[in-house]
Image (spheres, rainbow, N blue to C red):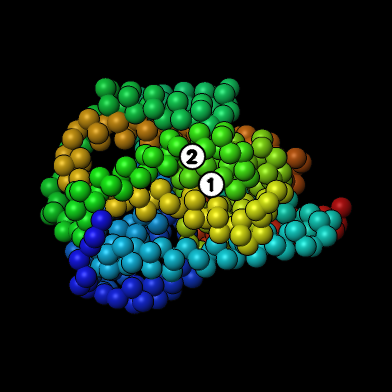
Amino acid sequence: MSEPHSYSHSSWAIFLIFLRLGLTSFGGPVAHIGYFREEFVSRRRWITEHSYADLVALCQFLPGPASSQVGLAIGLTQGGYRGALAAWAGFTLPSALALMLFAWGMTHIVEDSVSGALHGLKVVAVAVVTQAVWGMARTLCTDTLRVTIMAFAACFALLFPTTLGQISVILFAGVTGARLCKPAIAATHETLRLPVSKRAACYWLLIFLVLLTSLPLLTQIYPQQALAEIDAFFRTGSLVFGGGHVVLPLLQAEVVPNGWIDNDRFLAGYGAAQAVPGPLFTFAAFLGTSMQASPSGWAGGLLCLIAIFAPSFLLVAAALPFWEALRRQIHMRAALAGINAAVVGLLLAALYQPVWTSAILSPPDFALALLALVALMFWKVPPWLVVISSGLTGWALNLAG
C-alpha cells in the first residue's frame, strides 16, 4: 500500500489549516462542507469546483460523517496518507478535547450543582434533532415513496429499538430504493486524480471488512471491556448513513443498555456536543471518557474516538479509485435515495425516544425547547450560543425551583 512521495502540500501545512477550521467550524456537516469549499476551492484553489463536488458526492454515499470524510479526502489528495491523518487530527481534536474536558468536569463536580444545566442541555438536544429531522426530510423525502420509507423506518425503529433493527431498516430501504426510486440523472464531472491505486483500495476494503466481521466474534471469545468498546464504536462508525446526528440512536443502543453510561449523561453529552465546532462524531470522545467501566478517562476517550473514525479512513481510501464507475450506476444512486429516506425515519424515532421522553418533563421544558428551536431555525442564532444559553437557563430554573 505504498504511495507517491511528492505532494502539493506538507502534512504540517494541512494540519494547521484544518486546525483553524476545527476551531471555528460551527453549524454542522452542511456548514462544514461550505467552510471547506471556501477554504480549498475559492481561497486556496487546491482543487477545482468539479473535483470538490465529486468528493462531496462520494462522502454522502459512504456511511460515516460526511464532512470529516470530505476533509480526509482533501488531505489524501494533497498529502497522501499522512495528509489525510493531518486533516483529520486538525479538524477533530479541538472538539474532542473540549468534550473530554466536559466529561471530566461532570465526573469531578458534584452532580447536584450542575443538574439543572445538564437538563438544559438535554432539552436543547430536542431542538437540535428536530431541526435535523426537518431539514433532512425536506431534502431527502421528496415524493410519496420516500415519505413512506421514512414512516416505516420510524415505526420499525420504535417497535424494535436495537442496532440489528436499525441495520435491517437500512438494508430494506436500500433494496426498496434500488428497485423503486428514480433519482435524477447525474451530471458529468471531471475525473479525480487521487494517490490511491485500485490494488491499495482493495487492501483497505479488505481490512475494513475483516475488522467489521471479526471484532464481534473476538468480543465473544475475549470478553474484555476495551475490545467491546472498540467493536461497538467501530461498528457504529461503519453503519451510520446520513450524517452525524444519526449516530445518536446507534450509540444510545450500544452504550446505555450495556450500562457503560446512563441515559441522562448520554443526552447531556449529546447536547454539549452541539456547543463545540467540528464533527459531531467527537461525541464518542465524551462517551469514552465518561464510561463507568475501564478503560475510561482520557484513555477511554481516545480509544472510542479512534474506533468510531477508523471506518472513515478505510472506506474513503477504499472507495476513491472506484467512485467514478460507481456513481454512474443508476441503481446505486437509487439505493442511496431509499437509504437516505430511512435515515430520516431513524432520526425521527430517536427524536421521540430517547430525546423527547427523557428531556421534556414539564411545560417549562417544552417552552425552552421551542425557544431553542425557533432560535436555531428562524433567528439563525449560532448553535453554540443556543446550547450555552439553554444550559444556563436550565441551571437558573433549577435554582429557582
Front position in the image: 228 or 22: 228
The residue type indicated by label 2 comes to Leu
Which residue position holds label 2? 215
Q: Secondary structure at mark 2?
A: helix
Q: Position of residue 325 (x, y in %)?
A: 16, 42
Residue topped by disc 1:
230
**On the image, which quarter does residue 334 sit in?**
top left
Q: Is residue 291 left or right of residue 195?
A: right
Q: Which mark is residue 146?
A: none
Which sits in the foreground, 49 or 79? Answer: 79
Q: CA distance from mark 2 to mark 1?
A: 8 Å
First in sequence: mark 2 or mark 1?
Answer: 2
330 and 362: which one is in front? Answer: 330
Query: What is the crowding at mark 1: few (fewer than 14 residues within 10 Å), some, or many (at least 20)?
Result: many
Task: Verify CB contact (< 8 Å) between mark 2 and mark 1.
Answer: yes
Q: Quadrant of the N terminus?
A: bottom left
